[in-house]
Amino acid sequence: MFHDSYGREVNYIRLSVTDRCNLQCFYCRTDGCVKFIPHENVLSYEEMLRLVKAAEKMNVSKLRLTGGEPFVRKDFLAFLGMLKEECPKLDVRITTNGTLLGGKVPALKHLGIKRINISLDTLKAEKFKEITSRDFLPRVERAIDDCLHYGLTVKINVVAMRGVNDNEIRDFVKLAKVLPVDIRFIEFMPIGGCSHWKEGYAISAKEILQEAQSVAKLTPLEKKSKTDGPARLYSIQNGEGRIGMISAMSDHFCKTCNRLRITSDGRLRTCLFSDKEYKLRPALRNSRLDDDQLLRIMQRATESKPLGYKLLEKRLNSASVCTKAMSSIGG
Ligand SMILES: Nc1nc2c(ncn2[C@@H]2O[C@H](COP(=O)(O)OP(=O)(O)OP(=O)(O)O)[C@@H](O)[C@H]2O)c(=O)[nH]1
Ligand SMILES: C[S@@+](CC[C@H](N)C(=O)[O-])C[C@H]1O[C@@H](n2cnc3c(N)ncnc32)[C@H](O)[C@@H]1O
Ligand code: SF4
Ligand code: SF4
């Protein structure tokens, strides 16, 4: 088991398969500002698989594939096939913007993917274009329908922003009343050197919850499993789905943090908010180093895993807490 100096144990890895994306959500990345990773530095799927298999030996049981947009990377479905074959016990999940899922959901189902998180910040086509720079709302709606049709568990991630989509909180709650999905409202985090974060956008989970309660009776739910993500969940009276709050800014969950992140160029980040990275790629590409040595590097890094909220507290005014863009980290 990877463990840190605060007694936290890691059982969940978030692996970014690419830093490229077909959208430009303004809260995540800005065109021209983010420098892409050169192709030769991106880990091959074989290298990623080796890392994952090694991590499994340390009792990592949950893997989230993210990006950038994971479905932008060539042969992503083949990579899922490799994971299924080589790591049959691993709980593999995906976070995606949903725009490239067209026609792929039956294959996901066949590959044993049971859960998918889809990011969608608005139910209005024009607003979707304003936020993402693309006209793809129908594609995302279709992707959600397809995933539900094929029996995948769907969570919808909504970054809540005052003056942008706060007037849709009730609409999202109404959606969770009729669809069996978790709608998770995420507090906008000041991440990345070119972040558009401003105090004015901030809405706390508490405020979102109040707004949500004006259209539905919500009851808090207990966490079920040690590998659960950071959302605090609520059931909806007479509703099909649930509501979640990811309160990274106003009510942090660092004390129970159970995850490590690996970027697509093989850098281990022990905290979303910290730019301290540990280079795994040179070790992976050094034929004299075996998996045990790789795991030793990961364990030593984990020992220094910080409490991210302390970094938030130290930042100045509206500065970003770290310089790397969310699309390069994987969220
Ligand atoms: N601050 C902080 N935010 C996180 C962390 N993990 C996930 N998030 C944020 O939560 C949002 C949703 O993340 P997802 O990729 O859907 O993953 P998850 O919430 O762990 O997923 P589940 O395992 O399905 O609960 C993203 O905006 C993430 O950046 C974390 O460890 N710290
Ligand atoms: C970086 S994206 C990568 C995966 C995929 N492209 C997607 O959008 O789902 C992962 C998650 O991070 C969230 N995210 C990006 N920037 C954020 C920010 N500044 N604050 C909070 N969440 C953010 C997105 O909404 C998404 O749910
Ligand atoms: S949130 Fe996801 S879809 Fe949007 S720009 Fe970032 S990586 Fe791309
Ligand atoms: S901010 Fe860092 S320590 Fe806190 S929950 Fe997120 S990744 Fe974990």
Image (cartoon, rainbow, N blue to C red):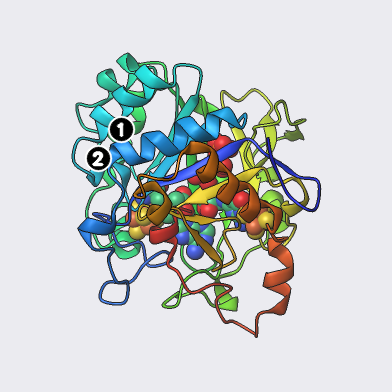
Towards the viewer: 120 or 224: 224
Quarter-wise, where is residue 305 in the image? Answer: bottom right
Measured along the vertical axis of the image, is residue 266 above or below residue 147? Answer: below
Q: Within 10 angstroms of label 1, few (less than 14), some, or many (20 or more) residues?
A: many
Rendered residue at 73%/74% (across/down): 313
Rendered residue at 31%/25% (across/down): 82
Residue picked out by circle 1: 143
Q: Is residue 35 visible?
A: yes
Q: Position of residue 244 (x, y in %)?
A: 63, 41
The local secondary structure at tag 1 comes to helix
Instruction: Tell whether 230 sits left or right of 198.
Output: right
Q: Position of residue 116 (x, y in %)?
A: 43, 31
* Amino acid type for the residue under numbered disc 1: Ala
Rendered residue at 46%/28% (across/down): 92
Instruction: Tell whether 275 sits left or right of 285.
Output: right
* Amino acid type for the residue under numbered disc 2: Arg
Number of residue marks = 2
Towards the viewer: 237 or 43: 43
Q: Which mark is residue 139?
A: 2
Q: Would you say the residues marked 1 and 2 are in contact, meaning their CB atoms lie under 8 Å apart?
A: yes
Rendered residue at 67%/63% (across/down): 249
